[in-house]
Image (tube, helix red, strand yellow):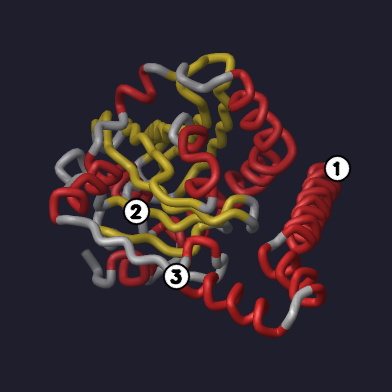
Amino acid sequence: MASASFTAAVAVALCALLSLAEVCEEHSDTSLLQGHFAAVSPHAVEQQHSSLRQDKEKWPLSGETHILSEEETAEYSSWFTSDLLPKWENRNLESTWKLQTTITIKQPAQTVFDAIMTSNMWPVCYPNTLSVGGFSHQPFTPETPAGMILEKFLWAGAFYSLFRYQVEDYQPPSFATFDGAIIFSVGDVIAQDAVDTIGGRFQYNLTSTGPNETSWTRTVYFYQDKSATLLQQTAFATMMNTVIFPAQKKGAPQYVNCAKIFLETPGWERELWGSSK
């Protein structure tokens, strides 16, 4: 059902874009000029064309130069360094989605904790993670430099985003939380304010159930903060209902089952950390 709704939504969007493109084509400078050219003399046509070349603002195919000063460039560092905890604390509970999975892994709790707190585990096992960046081959902690826990993610296999994460709670080997935010996506171009209202939090609870056995409960929260408008809340709920949450409900159990198989297979340390650690 979600797949059908998503397909229909994409079809409608494409049709709208195509219709808009046709309208734009009918009313573009080029089309208007073509009609005008047919009705005037060659000399007038050449004068009009020359005028367009001189006034590039009227010509839709002109390029653009954008130069940022060092100070302006530095402003973009906030995407990597801003504190994510206030967003979580300001979340709208009515616009919060929660997904929880639990699995038992035949490894000591500290071993499991270090492995699942290593971002390189995500491309190894999570179906929508394309790659990771920053410090990805060692467990991340509150001391990991800001902006250096990065994930390149494909929502439901369709929408690309770059996430950054920030560790909040850190109590090895039993408990950890880390907050996430979208710092780059296609939505930035058309709806930056809406994208900025979205956040996420991961919570890991680990319990030792034996000398070589650990129960891992993974909880993920998707939410909007209280700054979201009613229209933004509606759009977010629609995307969550039709695309994102159905994909997450499949991806989350796939991920923890893959992690279990991976961590119970000899040689996993070299694959995850690049060494025997």
Query: Circle 2 sits in a helix, a strand or a loop, which is it?
Result: strand
Q: How many angstroms separate mark 1 from mark 3 (CA)? A: 43 Å
Kindly identify which residue carries mark 1.
1
- Label 2 sits on what residue type? Leu
- Depth order, front residue of 23/11: 23
Q: Measured from the top left, where is residue 19 in percent x and y? A: 82, 55
Identify the mark nearer the N-term, 1 or 2: 1
Kindly identify which residue carries mark 2.
150
- Depth order, front residue of 104/35: 35
Identify the mark nearer the N-term, 2 or 3: 3
Name the residue at 37% across, 49% down: 116
Name the residue at 82% across, 49% down: 12
Q: Measured from the top left, where is residue 97 in percent x and y? A: 58, 26
Q: Is residue 178 above or below residue 118?
A: above
Q: How many angstroms separate mark 2 from mark 3 (CA)? A: 32 Å
**Mark 1 Cα within 10 Å, few/some/many (few <14, many 20+)?**
few
Camera sees residue 124: no
- Label 1 sits on what residue type? Met
- Depth order, front residue of 20/71: 20
**Image check: 17 left or right of 143?**
right
Query: Circle 3 sits in a helix, a strand or a loop, which is it?
Result: loop
